[in-house]
Amino acid sequence: MDASNAGGEFSRGATLKDLIELCRNLNQAGARYIVIGGFAVIHHGYFRGTNVIDLLVETSLQNLEKVKIALLALPDKAIKEIEPAEIAKYQVIRVADEVVVDLMTLACGISYEQAEADIEFKVLENVQIPFLKPGLLIKTKDTFRPVDQADRAYLQELIKRQKEDQEKKKPWWRW
């Protein structure tokens, strides 16, 4: 990170384009990650803003090195200051570059390994993006932050509607 952006005070809000480019770089590096947080909730249909890209990452040092290589594509190269072992040591590392990326080893107690079976892939601009499915995403929102409370309410309603839709699709003899 250059001195003009020390601390990330000049970071701008992340856009969908930023997410796609970051995921393209992560995929090219072979990194294992899942998009969670605001962009995952938006993916599931909730219209809300977000300023940060939240990633749940697999914690092997080999994978974290791949994540670091991918994040070196960001303009300020803020990830250069962070070693893979540091990422593994903490639950959240905030990389304040042109956009802010939160690298999480745990999200409300959920690890990459626990979440890996609940990935839903979406292809955007020829980039395969791994989003966390609503059932487990809701568990990563177990905080007191008002935005997480609103996300949980939306996700609970979404899950309820999905169950109702599944019930409607059952053959009449299984009612």
Image (cartoon, rainbow, N blue to C red):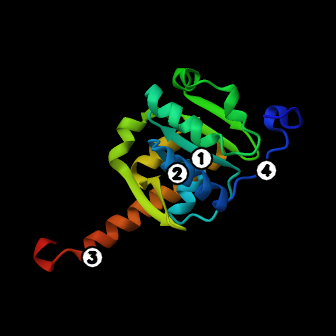
Question: Measured from the top left, where is residue 129 in percent x and y?
Answer: 48, 57
Q: Amino acid at mark 3?
A: Lys
Spatial separation of the CA atoms under disc 2 and disc 1: 6 Å
Q: Is residue 42 above or below residue 95?
A: below
Q: Of residues 73 and 4, which is closer to you in this image?
A: 73
Mark 4 touches mark 3? (CB < 8 Å):
no
- Of badges 2 and 4, nearer the viewer stands 4
Spatial separation of the CA atoms under disc 2 and disc 4: 26 Å
Mark 4 touches mark 1? (CB < 8 Å):
no
Q: Quadrant of the C terminus?
A: bottom left
Q: Where residue 152 is drawn, which disc sits there?
A: 2
Q: Residue at x 78, y 34 (%)?
A: 1
Spatial separation of the CA atoms under disc 4 and disc 1: 21 Å
* Label 1 Cα crowd, 10 Å radius (few <14 / some 14-19 / many 20+): some
Disc 3 on helix, strand or loop? helix
Spatial separation of the CA atoms under disc 4 and disc 3: 44 Å
Q: Residue at x 52, y 31 (%)?
A: 65
Residue marked by disc 3: 168
Residue marked by disc 1: 148
